[in-house]
Image (cartoon, rainbow, N blue to C red):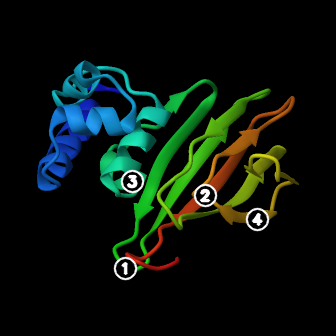
Amino acid sequence: MDKLSLSTLGQHLQTLRTERGLSLSQLANEAGIAKSNLCRLEQGNGNPTLDTIWRLAVQLNVPFGTLVAPITVPLGEDGVQVRLIDQGKDSPQVDAYWMRCAPNTLRHAEAHTPGAQESLTLISGRLEAGPDGDTTSLVPGETLTFPADQPHLYRTQAAEATLILTITYAEKGGTP
């Protein structure tokens, strides 16, 4: 991440944490990260993984896009790049992402907030995706929707895959 993106993420983290009355120690512990790492992130430093950002979003009970908007550079690691395209303002909230997975990539994603669902449409390449133990193989033009509030994965073979991914977050106290 570039310096501006890190600063934006840090500001969002600190604002959301304080709004919820959480200490650095509480949020770090609940998200399973070191307090020193969370402190660095809030100061606009560090190099967070996608999993770290997701865990923080889940613990703060906000969509991933809330933490990364308006970061415009792709966030990535281990052969996966993700960019927020748009963040819905209605209820239920729907966020849209562009995602690219390099050849021979296996990306395990942690569970999102309760009730969240993902829909992805493959643009190019081949992709296996879905909940652990219940994945589906996709070719360009195919769409898959699955519960994202459980661990899931994305796997490519010899070619990279690009896709459009939407996450629909459950309404407070309900389903998407």
Please tell me whether residue 125 is drawn above or below residue 142 in the rendered image: above
* Lower position in the chain sequence, tag 4 or tag 2: 4
The amino acid type of the residue labelled 3 equals Gly
Q: Which residue is mark 4?
A: 143
The amino acid type of the residue labelled 2 equals Ala
Q: Tell me, yes or no, whether the two marked residues, 4 and 2, touch with CB atoms within 8 Å.
A: no
Distance from label 4 to label 2 (Cα)? 15 Å
The amino acid type of the residue labelled 1 equals Asp
Q: Position of residue 41 (x, y in %)?
A: 25, 28
Q: Which residue is mark 1?
A: 90
Q: Tell me, yes or no, whether the two marked residues, 1 and 3, touch with CB atoms within 8 Å.
A: no
Instruction: Say left or right for 91 vs 130.
Output: left
Q: Which residue is mark 3?
A: 65
Distance from label 1 to label 2 (Cα)? 19 Å
Q: Position of residue 112 (x, y in %)?
A: 51, 53
Q: Secondary structure at mark 2?
A: loop
Q: Which residue is mark 2?
A: 148
Q: Secondary structure at mark 3?
A: helix
Asked if one can make out residue 69 in the rendered structure from this viewpoint, the answer is no
Residue 45: image quadrant is: top left
Residue drawn at the location 82% of the way across and 51% of the way down? 135
